[in-house]
Amino acid sequence: MTLELQIRHSNSSDVSLDDCAGFSRVFGDALEASSLLTEAYVLEISSPGIGEQLSTERDFKTFRGFPVEVLHSSKDNSEQRLEGLLLERNEEALQINIHGRVKRISRENVIAVRLTNPGR
């Protein structure tokens, strides 16, 4: 049996190998102490990936068609999150495909764009 866990920082910063190792030790010890699993297992701790945040023009060209999460400010200045497939980023706007519909977000309102895993 393999138990796979993916960890991430709440502030969206990259997860290091040291972070994974530290979490693995603490979680592994807690799991062993709990006696929840009665058969042998392998514990795998990973992160969504280093550099999942898109920032450069090259990033936006390379990851066209990939699933992304866009954090942006709305008209009332509240933060909103959208998920879709990255279509394009130009001087004026970022465009994503959300279930077959193109959403255009002004670049000045985009706070962050990061790669995601579909179905998560």
Image (tube, rainbow, N blue to C red):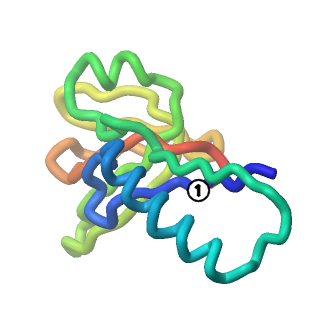
Task: Give the residue at the far right of this rendering.
Answer: 39
Q: Nearer the viewer, residue 47 or 96?
A: 47
- For the point 56% across and 65% down, the residue is 28
Question: Who's the residue at 73% across and 79% down the image?
Answer: 35
Identified by mark 1, the residue type is Leu
Numbered label tally? 1
Q: Is residue 49 left or right of residue 111?
A: right
* 34 relative to 70, above or below: below
Q: Is residue 33 left or right of residue 20?
A: right
Q: Residues within 10 Å of mark 1 (few under 14, many from 20)?
A: few
Instruction: Tell me residue 59's x, y (percent).
Output: 30, 23
- Residue drawn 35% across the image and 42% down it: 17
Quadrant containing the C terminus in the rendered view = bottom right
Q: At x 43% / y 49%, what residue is drawn?
A: 69
Q: Secondary structure at mark 1?
A: strand
Indicate the quadrant where residue 49 lies: top left
Q: Nearer the viewer, residue 41 or 74?
A: 41
Image location of residue 55, percent across then percent down: 22, 33
Residue 88 in percent (x, y) is at 37, 26
**Picture quarter containing residue 53?**
top left
Q: Position of residue 72 (x, y in %)?
A: 28, 57
Which residue is label 1 attached to? 5
